[in-house]
Amino acid sequence: MDALLNLYKPAGMTSREAVDAVRRILNVRRAGHSGTLDPGAEGVLLICLGKATRLNEFLQWLPKTYRATMVLGIQTTTQDAEGEVIASTDASGVTREMVEATLPRFTGEIEQIPPMHSAVHHEGRRLYELAREGKVVPREARKVSVYRLQLLNFSPGEHPEAEIEVECSTGTYIRTLCADIGDALDVGGYMKSLVRTAIGAFRAEDAVTLQQLEAEGGDKHLIPMAQAVEGILPVWRPHPRVLRLFRLGSFVKPKPFPPVPLPAEKPPYIAVLDAAGELFAIATVRRDEVWPYKVFGERVLYHPRSVEEDLG
């Protein structure tokens, strides 16, 4: 079973537990996910099955969309509702207009310091392991991209609640974003709830629940690998001889060159489809050469050589 599954992870379950549940229901051995959702969060979790686990690095390129509710005037140890309250202040003076005026400061390329309660490594250990021991260590700021940040709802009060929608790059901590917005308003804040509504074109309204999967099986919910890479990589359908050479580990110098637009902002990878439209390989472009990068089939040891003929 080599495919993807758009799963709706419920709150109260770790991403690893969700993967294990899918593996049990579908009776598959190899499975993983393309981006952790905290236990308290819910929403889209892309599950990679079988050979599709090798697509994970490309799925990381997809933007992620979230809806988060933040509480202003209260700070917690974890920047979310799971932590202990460490500060509280009257934030009734914060208005909707003040929040809206603050959001542009957190749009575009920004820097975030990973929270101590995160899976980031520090000297061979996860930060959350150190945090559980009461330790706080220096963390370097990381650059992330926030493509869109919008205030959806605002409820005034001593501790106002603001619902925001965020479209961002992989690696963005939404709870840190909420805490930083609170700091920018001089009242502090924490993330009360989080829903991941989309990863690229994979939307929450199209996701399947574990209960549905248990009742219906996976057949009608599985996403072919070729469909999964659409919108991520340019697609090339070459001559069958190219596929045979890629299986052997050879690179090719096709004439004419694959007529695919290579994205300038990403490494020049292309998705190679076979005659049936199934994903055969991921290839990388080096000048006038196309090299197999990941082949989703049996490979044999073979000395790489150039093939220069009409293989387009």
Image (cartoon, grey):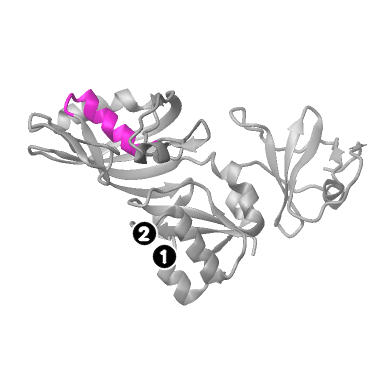
Estimate the x, y position of residue 281 in percent, counting from the top left: 73, 48
Q: Looking at the rendering, in which quadrant would you find the N terminus?
A: bottom right
Three-letter amino acid code at the position of disc 1: Thr
Q: Is residue 183 magenta?
A: yes
Describe residue 287's horizontal placement relative to residue 188 as left or right.
right
- Residue for badge 1: 209
Q: Is residue 288 above or below residue 219?
A: above
Toward the viewer: 12 or 153?
Answer: 12
Do the numbered discs 2 and 1 sit on residues whose CB atoms are within 8 Å? yes
Q: Residue at x 46, y 73 (%)?
A: 214
Q: Secondary structure at mark 1?
A: loop
Q: Looking at the rendering, in which quadrant would you find the C terminus?
A: top right
Please give the range of residues in magenta.
173-187
Could you say which quadrant of the image residue 139 lies in?
top left
Q: Is residue 82 magenta?
A: no
Counting the numbered discs, the total is 2
Toward the viewer: 103 or 260?
Answer: 103
